[in-house]
Image: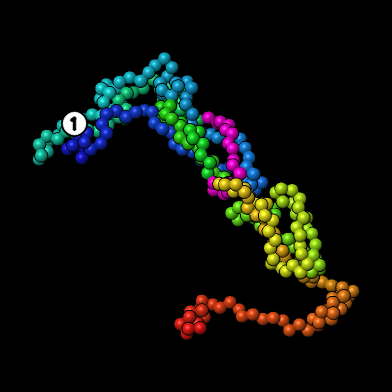
Amino acid sequence: MDAFFGAASGQRGPRSRTRRGQDAMIRLEITLEEAAFGTTKELQVDTAVTCTTCSGEGAAPGTSAQTCDMCRGKGEVSQVTRSFLGQVMTSRPCPQCQGFGTVVPTPCPECAGDGRVRARRTLTVKIPAGVDNGTRIQLAGEGEVGPGGGPAGDLYVEIAETSHTVFQRRGDDLHCTVTIPMTAASLGTQVPLQTLDGLEEVDIRPGTQSGQSIPLHGRGITHLRGGGRGDLIVHVEVQTPTKLDAEQEELLRRLAVLRGEERPSGQFAPGQQGLFSRLKDAFNGR
């Protein structure tokens, strides 16, 4: 299309040596406590920065870029050829200056004419409360500096939350499991639990069954958007003893007699139906 319509098919003229830099991303590991309440971290990042020797120009100190003598600064060269349609003029980027319109006869020895070098920087990033795995925090203008000293891209900090020894996170709620003996489940007790807010007593009511859950409201993760916090859900697991000595066994037998449970009949409930059984019942109108 350039051959027939020239400037109508695309941008003409020399290209700019100054371009925007690329975005960069870095992973940051934080603890569950830091995710719950927020924190401030210092990061060390390796990115391209503007060359201080040439100030991003790409030319050695005391020199400068010069107009290309092949394209005379246009960034492109034209050629006329004959075809069955007649004379056709084609344009292509100048091979000498690669379309920039200028050449750098003496490149900067520090950056080799690119106008940027790689360097390690230390950044301070504020982690808001409520972030989760995969959350990305954007730091505008902290990415790669562009060629020719162009504006820098953005830096994205991706959060990676480390696993906790006690709590499992589900959204903004926390879950944990506490195992208690059957005597404590029957009589009731209080179990100390180290929460994110400090030591608290979990109230186990008499007659608590295995699989029950006890919510501690407002002890979870801070909501990232909006106030308040999630809950801490304590799941109770009742442990049945597998080994009893003679005295313990006799006490349990006496308890079974007192409760009329020497020969329990048990309570049975229908098992969960499979998919084909449910479909069959549906077609039969059950």
Residue 207, percent across and down?
76, 69
From this view, report whether residue 70 is shown above or below residue 10: above
76 displayed left or right of 209:
left
In the foreground, 223 or 102: 223
User: What sort of colour scheme is used for the picture?
Assistant: rainbow
Q: Which residue is mark 1?
A: 79
Residue 261, percent across and down?
79, 81
What residue is drawn where x is 36% and y is 28%? 17
29 displayed left or right of 48:
right
Residue 235, percent across and down?
69, 62
What residue is drawn where x is 39% and y is 20%? 106
From this view, report whether residue 30 is shown above or below residue 45: below
Q: Is residue 41 magenta?
A: no
Q: In this orientation, does residue 59 appear?
A: yes
From this view, report whether residue 46 is shown above or below residue 227: above
Q: In this orientation, does residue 169 appear?
A: no
The magenta stretch spans which residues?
119-135
Label 1, residues with CA under 10 Å away: few <14, some 14-19, many ≥20: few
Residue 75, percent across and down?
28, 28
In the foreground, 123 or 283: 283
